[in-house]
Image (spheres, helix red, strand yellow):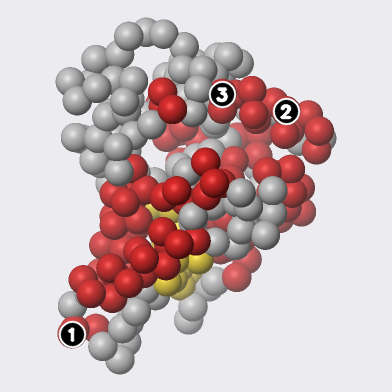
Amino acid sequence: MSAAVALFSGGKDSAVSFYWALKNYDQVVAVSIDYPGRPKQEKSAAQAIVAQTSATLLSPSLPFMFSSEQGYTGETSGSVISSKESAYIPMRNLLFYGTAAYYAEIFQIPDIIVGNYRGEGVTYPDASQDFLRKMEDLYALSMSRKYAGTCDHLRLLTPLLAYDEYEVALLGKDLGVPLHLTWSCWRDLDAPCMQCYSCKERERVFSQTGVITHP
């Protein structure tokens, strides 16, 4: 039986890669990581979407992880997050990929699915192929040798890497992803702020691809 661990935030891109995993594997474990300042609606979106599938949902918490907007104390300025930089979380993907690998090794699942799309690695170096390959090397150095023969390696797979953000949305439609249930806003509100970078990007991509924008 084939199995995969899928990192799933509750956002649009990770939802598409999660549904890709559902189509290509017999068993999927969705890992939706919680941390201070994570929008409650994003967490709820992940729970609602996974509940419609046969996947298992795990929600580990990283209570020490704050964004640069919050600082290490976790206190926010209350300002609208309008740029990519202000939403930066130090070592975010390193922590996320490490957490996914933890569960992959425990469950002896060789494949970890992430939602990186084409060109994302230019803006975010820790979403690049070079970073992912080096993470795989670290996995190989870190794994317990007792799994040799059953799960002697871990792979980070990027099924969306050939697609730009518009093509990812269209792929989501083809896969039947409930994209209207996903959450993109960086702010912790009851409804999307429509002012942050992520909200604006979502509106632009979804309006040009005919995807329903909001829950």
Residue 209 falls in which quadrant of the image?
top right
* C-alpha span from label 3 to label 2: 11 Å
Query: Is 69 placed above or below 135 here?
Result: above
Q: Which residue is mark 1?
A: 146
Per the model, the C-alpha gap separating discs 3 and 1 is: 45 Å
The residue labelled by disc 2 is 204
> Residue 180: where, in percent of width, then height?
66, 34
Measured from the top left, where is residue 181 in percent x and y?
Answer: 60, 34
Q: Position of residue 125 (x, y in %)?
A: 45, 48
Q: Amino acid at mark 1?
A: Lys
User: Which of the two labelled residues, at mark 3 and mark 2, occupies the earlier sequence position?
Assistant: 3
Amino acid at dot 2? Arg
Residue located farthest toward the top when viewing the structure as drawn: 78
Amino acid type shown at disc 3: Tyr
* Residue 64: image location, x then y, percent: 19, 35
Mark 3 and mark 2 in contact? Answer it, CB < 8 Å: no
Seen at 37% across and 73% down, the residue is 154
Q: Label 2 vs label 1: CA separation?
A: 49 Å
Q: State the SS at label 1.
A: helix
Q: Earlier in the sequence, mark 3 or mark 1?
A: 1
Q: Is residue 184 visible?
A: yes
**Secondary structure found at label 2:** helix
Residue in the picture at 37% in, 8% down: 78
Circle 3 residue: 197
Front: mark 2 or 1: 2
Q: Between 205 and 128, which is closer to the camera in this rendering?
A: 128
- Above or below, 68 against 150 in this view is above
